[in-house]
Image (tube, rainbow, N blue to C red):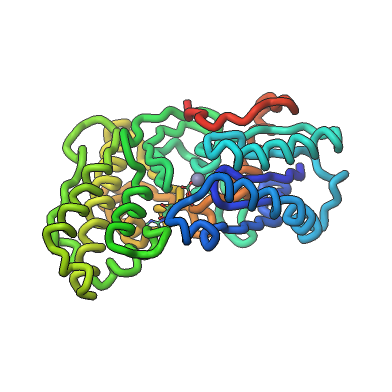
Amino acid sequence: MIILAIETSCDETSVAVVREGVVVTNLVASQIQLHAEYGGVVPELAAREHLKNLAPMVRTALAAAGVTPAELDALAATRGPGLPNALLVGLKAAQGMAFALRKPFLGIHHHEAHLFSPWITGDPPRGDFAAFVPNISLIVSGGHTMIVHVDSEVKHRVLGATIDDAAGECFDKAAKLMGLAYPGGPEIDRLARRGNPAAIAFPRPLLRDTHDDFSFSGLKTAVRYHIRDHPATLASGPQLCDLCASVQAAIVEVLVTKTVRAARRRGLRCITASGGVTCNQSLREALTRACAKEGFQLRLASRALCTDNAAMVGLLAERKLLHGVPTTDLDAEILPGWALP
Ligand code: KG4
Ligand code: ZN
């Protein structure tokens, strides 16, 4: 089966061609530079950029894969959740192509695609679904933080999510308070490597609670108060690194502790993680240490596939079609607030 997949839920335009479980092409055009000057994603600009990039990227992806439109077996696109106008560009383009080519179309849930990105490995990347085992999956991005019990490729249940800010949002907002460039997560990651994570005792929100929900807005406020009370911190390189390391340590400890606890409680011995924040070096190391200690298997999405991409959309679409999941109507609308079941 050959599938062309499109992802435009936020600020990355991505087009992939997948064939028999293998990612043949995965093009990603990041808009980070465009939004950086505004300190965050501007939805209208994101949609216009998708519109500008999409058609040439589809042509390039097909040419790079050596596939003609007529050879496609199906089309797929992210249907939600995400920024409405951004989603609209990718979904309607894929539905239009499916209509013109008389091929089936599948609208994919963005987080469900993230759930399967840790099972994509190798070069060229392929879906390692033979190795799949039920797992507890941590999705951590700029918009979402959730713990999901994944039973199979088509069966999962959300156990908990953030009740306010997402983990990536906390990284980005803390970085903004420190005067760092957008997106702040990678900047904090970089500076934290030279800092002392025990320098400042920031709160670990909801760490002791036995449920699987998160809350990060209080941590961001604690950073604001720390900077207000210690303004010299930002002028000193070593103190700024200590601040970054301490904020990062609080976020990472909460994420890792709650994910491991959820797996233990449910008797699952595999943890997976995906989403932009999974690029964070300290989070990757802490999850690796915790899983080694518990004797758990760990699957981290590769850095290239942590952030938004169409490869995960295409591979999941292929699995769903092979499982006999019904296709999506060609006039189906975007679902910007689509909750993961
Ligand atoms: O998954 P993603 O690309 O887009 C969303 O769907 O949100 O995630 C972007 C988020 C941003 O908040 C960014 O700061 C964060 O991921 N991020 C990081 C790192 N790389 C990206 N956070 C911490 N450390 C990193 N190395
Ligand atoms: Zn995402």
Quadrant holding the N terminus: top right
- For residue 272, say whether it is visible: no
Tell me if residue 200 comes above or below residue 1 in the rendering: below
Question: Which is nearer the eye, 7 or 121?
Answer: 7
The structure residue drawn at horizontal position 62% and vertical position 31%, both measured from the top left corner, is 334
Q: Is residue 234 left or right of residue 175?
A: left
Question: Which is nearer the eye, 180 or 14?
Answer: 180
Question: Which is nearer the eye, 62 or 157?
Answer: 62
Number of numbered markers: 0
- For residue 145, say whether it is visible: yes
Q: Is residue 8 left or right of residue 114?
A: right
Q: Hey, which residue is sitting farthest bottom in the picture?
A: 237
Picture coordinates of residue 177 (x, y %)? 28, 57
The structure residue drawn at horizontal position 42% and vertical position 58%, both measured from the top left corner, is 183
Q: Is residue 24 left or right of residue 189?
A: right
Q: Is residue 62 left or right of residue 45?
A: right
Tell me if residue 177 comes above or below residue 112 in the rendering: below
Picture coordinates of residue 214 (x, y %)? 29, 38
Q: Quadrant of residue 180?
A: bottom left
The structure residue drawn at horizontal position 76% and vertical position 38%, both measured from the top left corner, is 74
Tell me if residue 62 comes above or below residue 191 in the rendering: above
Picture coordinates of residue 150 (x, y %)? 45, 34
Q: Quadrant of residue 27?
A: bottom right
The structure residue drawn at horizontal position 36% and vertical position 48%, both measured from the top left corner, is 169
Picture coordinates of residue 164 (x, y %)? 32, 36
